[in-house]
Image (tube, rainbow, N blue to C red):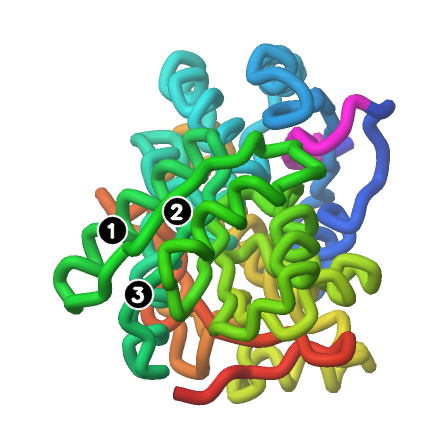
Amino acid sequence: MVAPLSVGILNDLSHQTPGPSDTEHWLRLAVDELRSSGRIDREVQFVYSSGLGLPAGTAAAVERAYVALVEQDVLLIVGPAIGDNALAVTALTERYRVPTLNWAGAERARGEYMFQLQVGSHEDESIVLARYLVLRGCRRVGVIYDRSPIGRRHLMFLQAEAELLGLRIAATSSVPPLTEEAGAEIEAVLESGADALVYLGLGVSAPAVARAVAIRDWRGTRAMNTAGIRGYAPEFARTIDGWLYVDMHSDDNLTLAALRGRLGLAPSRSLAAAKGYDLGRLVAECLARAPERTREGVREGLELVKWLPAAQGHEGTLLGFGKWDRGALHGSYLVLRQWLDGQTIEAQP
């Protein structure tokens, strides 16, 4: 009997008993495509491990879940999904020399064995937001950010880009990343005379920020980072109605359009499909291209993935890695959209 190729899936969003997930659905779809073409010549099995990570849980829980996968002899680990947890695990990838593919927003969560599929970016999103605000004629920006490594990282890059563009940061205020009340912080920022308001963070605190703004009936430009992706939950979308945000899918992406057509997916599934299929293809392609079926071979297989048309981002975005290139997406992979009446609409410059 031929032994299957074993891939670990690390879930840092829950402490529940590991089991089949939406992530496996997309990995399996891409793997089966290469199995049917003969490029992968044996079964691929998925092994699970879970640990509730930051901000609600702990980094230690994710680290334990990671080690549990290492001990099950997987060739590759997929995850974590949250930037703070990916940063915590990066050192373990080097210690155990296991190729790992996270789908978080932290570009610092990269290394010899740590690869990243950018689902957002703590560094690039703020640059995109700042440039768009200038195009809209905004001159004074108030910022609310999570009191966390994610929030502070976003703020640092927003401040740097704003300085280059002549965009003034009128006021800043931080909130706990799990807060449900942000009235005092919003009041302090709006008193600065800002003509735009930006929220930066993981997104759990975003509804509190949005509610505080709505109560004050403030009508300036409102924008947030990829925290706005949480708007695919209808209640969240209602709370942040009218807010601009950074997403990962574009209406002009032909790869995504073809995928949706082939699978009969509704527009509301665009983000999940784009992210999931890109993640799946990276996993399938690295297994197919690996020169040998070892962890070192799979690491090299990831480096050999080049110039795949991405389902995420604008048309022309590419997927791939290289010898010292650990960020998968290349090109205009961040897309500005806006929530309006429960629908996500692509923003035009």
Total numbered circles: 3
Q: Give the labeled residue for mark 2.
A: 122
Q: CA distance from mark 2 to mark 1?
A: 13 Å
> Mark 2 vs mark 1: which is more N-terminal?
2
Q: Position of residue 23 (x, y in %)?
A: 72, 48
* Mark 2: secondary structure: loop
* Residue 185 in view (yes/no): yes
In this rendering, the label closer to the viewer, 2 or 1:
1
Going by the numbered disc 1, the residue's amino acid type is Gln
Q: Quarter holding the N terminus?
A: top right
| Residue picked out by circle 1 | 159
Q: Is residue 331 left or right of residue 183?
A: left
Mark 1, Cα crowd under 10 Å, few <14 / some 14-19 / many 20+, is some
Magenta segment boundaries in residue numbering: 3-15
Residue picked out by circle 3: 140
Of helix, strand and loop, which one carries label 1? Answer: helix
Q: Which residue sits at x=56%, y=49%? A: 283
Closer to the camera in the image, 187 or 317: 187
Residue 197 falls in image quadrant:
bottom left
The nearer-to-camera label among 2 and 3 is 3
Q: Are marks 3 and 1 in contact (CB under 8 Å)?
A: no
Say above or below: 5 vs 191: above
- The residue type indicated by label 3 comes to Arg
Report the Cα–Cα distance between label 3 and label 1. 12 Å
Which numbered marker is on residue 344? none
| Badge 2: residue crowd in 10 Å (few <14, some 14–19, many ≥20) | many
Instruction: Work out whether 313 lies above or below 40.
Output: below
Assess whether residue 8 is covered by the magenta stretch. Answer: yes
